[in-house]
Image (cartoon, rainbow, N blue to C red):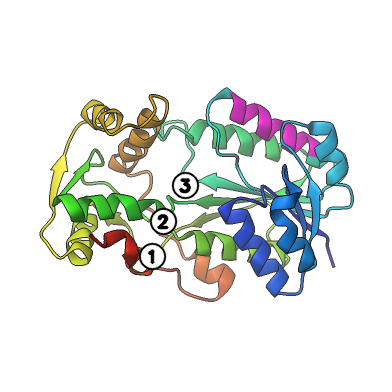
Amino acid sequence: MPTIAVIGASGNLGRRVADLLLDQGERPVLLTRNPAALAAYAQRGADVRHGDFADPAGLRAALTGVDRLLLISVDVVGPERLVLHSQAVDAAAAAGVGHVLYTSLSSPEPDNPAGVAASHRITETAIRGSGMTWTFLRNNIYAEFQVPTVAQAAASGQLITNSGKGASAYVSREDCAAAAAAVLTSDGHENAVYDITGPEAIDSAALAALAAEFGGQPVEVVDVDDESFIQGLLSAGLPPEAAPLIASFGTSARGGWAEHVSTAVHDLTGRAPISLHDVLSANRDAFKG
C-alpha cells in the first residue's frame, strides 16, 4: 500500500480528509506546524509529524517515505503564498514523493479576476514541472462560507452583492474532503484535473430565496459595483487587505468563472454532492434570532 500524507492536516479540510482516511483503515502521515493539535489523530493511528511550509529542509525530511501527498493550499495570500507553495513542491520532489494532489481553484486562468487565481495557476505550473505526477482538485467556493452571508441577508432582508447575474457552484467542504480521500486511496488519477463542485450553480436570486426560506421573511437582492461592495465590507470592519479579496470572488462569479457544474464528486466518491440548501440546513443555529 502506498504511504499517504497530508500537508496542512490541522486545518478544517485536512482534519476531515484525515478522518476519512483513518475510517478507511489507512495510517496517513499528517504534517502540521503543531503536532500537539493532532494528538487525537495520533491516538487513532496516524503518523503525526512536524512540517512547516516555511522550513523546506524540515519538510523534506518529514516527507521521507511518502508516496502520495495531498498539498492543501495555505490560507495566506500575496507573494508569501507563492513562496510557501514553491518550497513545499520542491521539498516533496526532493523527498521522492511520487504523486501530489493540490487543492486549487475553479478556472484559474489568467483572465479570472479572483484574487487567488494567479497563485493557484502558478502553483499548478510549478507542480507540472516538478517531475512528480499530479492531480489538481479545483475546488469551487466552499458552501460553508455562504452560511454567514445568507444569515445576514435573512436577518436584514437584503442580500448585497457584486456578483450580478453570475452564479457559483458552491461545494461543501465535506465533498472536497471525500474527493481528495478517494483520489489518495485509488489509482488512475495521474496528471488529471477535477473540478470539484456542488450539484448546481446558484446566483444571487437563488441565494436570496434561500435566505428568505431560512429567515422567514422576504429578501431583496441589492446589486452594487465592486468598489461599493468593498467599501461596505470595510465599513463592516473587514481588514483592508481582506475586503478586495472577498469582492474579487463576486467579480469572478459575475464573469462566469465559477458557474461550471461537474460530476467529479459523484464520479470519485459514488454519491451525489451535498447541496447548499443542505449545508445551510445543517447550520440552522446561524439563523436564530
Residue 180 can be seen in this image: no
Mark 2 vs mark 3: in front: 2
| Residue at image point 26% right, 46% down | 166
Judging by the rendered image, the residue that carries numbered circle 3 is 106
Q: Earlier in the sequence, mark 1 or mark 3?
A: 3
Distance of label 1 from label 2 (alpha carbons): 7 Å
Q: Is residue 98 left or right of residue 83?
A: right
Q: Secondary structure at mark 2?
A: helix
Residues in magenta, as a range: 80-91
Residue 181, x across and y down, in percent: 65, 64
Judging by the rendered image, the residue that carries numbered circle 1 is 279
Helix, strand or loop status at disc 3: loop
Residue 32 image position (x, y, % from top left): 72, 46
Q: Are marks 1 and 3 in contact (CB under 8 Å)?
A: no
Residue at image location 55% in from the left, 76% down from the top: 270
Q: Is residue 17 left or right of residue 92?
A: left
The kind of residue on which mark 3 rests is Ser
Q: Residues within 10 Å of mark 2 (few under 14, many from 20)?
A: some
